[in-house]
Image (spheres, helix red, strand yellow):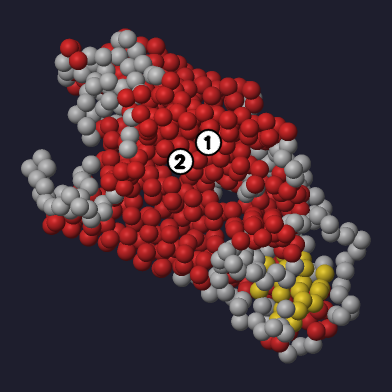
Amino acid sequence: MHVTSPVRTPLVTGGKTYADVTEDICKQVEGKPTRAWTIAFVISFVVLIYGTCCVFWTWWEGLGVWGLNKTVGWAWDITNFVWWVGIGHAGTLISAILLLFRMKYRTSINRAAEAMTIFAVLCAASFILMHMGRPWLAYWALPLPNAFGSLWVNFNSPLVWDVFAISTYFTVSLVFWYMGLVPDLATIRDRATSKVSRYIYGAFSLGWNGGAKTWARYEYISLILAGISTPLVLSVHTIVSMDFATSVIPGWHTTIFPPYFVAGAIFSGFAMVQNLMLITRVVFKLEDYITFEHIESMNKIITLTGSIVGVAYITEFFIAWYSGVEYERYAFLNRMLGPYWWAYWAMMTCNVISPQLFWSRKIRRSVTWTFVLSVIVNIGMWFERFVIIVTSLHRDYLPSSWAMFSPTMFDIGDYIFSFGLFFTLFLLFAKFLPVINMFEVKAIIRSASEKLPKSVSGVAKGESVTSPTFNKNVE
Amino acid sequence: MSHHNDSAKFLVGVYDDDEVVLKAVTEVKSAGVRIHEVYTPFPIHGLDVALGHPRTRIGIAAFLFGLTGFLTMVSLTYYTMGYDWPMVIGGKDNYAYPAYIPVMFELTVLFTALGMVGTFLVSNGLGPTVKPLMFDLRSTDNKFVMAIDLSKNKQSEVEIASVLRASGAAEVNVKQF
């Protein structure tokens, strides 16, 4: 009866029972914070405080503290925004698109990837607020009746589309993630020994009891959420790319942008998931759940999307030459050979060459290589946005207004702020919420385990193992 | 769930295995016992069908919410761009709807997601202050729990208990609310 097809590669190793899954994952939530967690949290929090001071000063003093000038009006702010939004694509891709494709390997990584998505989108949104300079007027981006003669927002503008795309994406991702958490929060609630945690996890688990009718509806809404999140996630970076593509700036005015940005987003998002999961799996001892199969599968997607990005870079170049437009040609030659040549070549090396190393099975199954290459990919993707934004702007039509951009400590400090925010939130998540989706892993154990124990149910915490007990009243 | 009275008495069959409980549902039903509900730590495919639960209609609700979102944005863009403050941009119509497709799409998705999840919570009676009716705390961990409402069944407690045991229950308990 308990046969795993030899064709399928196992996704859960160590002969885990249902009770083992609960125990292994709840342990992190229920136990005291480890030393490693505490140190990491303190560092992130200090970084967050430093970054918050920088952001505060940026707002207090004004955007003049950044290195912007009249030629380069967008630089690190929008680079960081696009970079974080891109990273925020992996979570929904994993949980929605891989669910529609019935890829079972998603179950071990979707929870953390979705959490990462939400935090990354928050970081991205913070740069939108920052680059407004007057964040208290952020509501002007919404179509609200106002005192200026009902001057509405311009729905022709991709910047307005972006407001809707990012806020919808954030809300729907949050709902999707939270709905996925509810059954697992109920598990923690039912195991809780202290009154406080029973109350808190009880409130957040919404009275979940796992009835068959509830589960049937739950699976149905998960499928619909996945179905609507799939075009949503594709729309978000498409719209972000239109912030550039609908302009007439040489280097931005490119029809290839939407698919190229989406591929790049998935590329960098998966790299960030790799970085976070490789650390989590070691620190929380989850090697049986996040196996080399998972690492390899994600690396394959990194190679695929990295190759798409590489082809897009080359296509862009070809089209710039083939168009015969001298401004377009110059914009691209300037990227490659101009004063920012180092940024361009950093992007090319990190994004086009490095993921090709994953063609080697040895490298894509190596933890060290995966970790290092994932960091390199994200460095490369940051440079991609920097190249697109700054090198397209800094030499415009009038050579007399050509300028260079160099970051000030506030450009850097505000970027550091987003790292502090991201890691503080991720560490809080990793401590107080189950980092792996327990119920989904339990649901695949039978078909995806390397080997199954005699009783797949296992022995729950505090359960007696003597003999089947029957209530005296019924005997 | 909320219909139970204070003295409701249940027999609770605890199963170790998801495959066993799925078969047990059919066996218990064919023995003429009405099942209140089965509680499991993860979704078991076909369990709702075996129990005879009707197919959920939440998809219809989701569609209607999506339609509402779509129409809301159609109206809002029409009112703001075409009627209240028309602007000529690039010599196009005031209501140049292809440019509004992105926002129409986003609002459709937003309304679908929030409306559907809201409907789900309401129809299942879920909320932050809801006390769950737990027949066995292990049913969110590793056990599969079948609850039988004694007041809804003609058979005696002992008869039902033996049906449950014969269907593979590892434990049979009494639970009173």
Q: Position of residue A90 (x, y in %)?
A: 49, 39
> Within 10 angstroms of label 1, few (less than 14), some, or many (20 or more) residues?
many
Question: Three-letter amino acid code at disc 1?
Answer: Phe
Going from N to C along the chain, the mark reached first, 1 or 2, is 2
What subunit carries mark 2? Answer: A
Distance from disc 1 to disc 2, alpha carbons, whole Å, reads 8 Å
Q: Which residue is mark 1?
A: A422
Secondary element at tag 2: helix
Which amino acid is tagged 2? Leu
- Residue at 22 percent across and 53 percent down: it is A146
Q: Residue at x 61, y 42 (%)?
A: A428
Instruction: Relative to A10, say whether A339 is above or below.
Output: above
Secondary structure under tag 1 reads helix
Residue visible at 49% across and 43% down in the picture: A118
Residue A325, above or below B5: above
Image coords of residue A159 (percent x, y) = 28, 40
Outermost residue toward the front in this view: A60
Q: Quadrant of residue A423?
A: top right
Residue at the far right in the pictured view: A466
**Residue A258 located left or right of residue A249:** right
Q: Are marks 1 and 2 in contact (CB under 8 Å)?
A: yes
Q: Position of residue A117 (x, y in %)?
A: 49, 41
Camera-side residue of A304 and A58: A58
Q: Residue most toward the left? A: B91
Q: Residue furthest bottom?
A: B154
Q: Position of residue A21 (x, y in %)?
A: 72, 49
Per the rendering, the mark at residue B111 is: none
The quadrant in which residue A369 appears is top right
Q: Nearer the viewer, residue B71 or A254?
A: B71
- Please count the marks in the image: 2
Badge 2 is on which residue? A122
Q: Quadrant of the C terminus of chain A?
A: bottom right
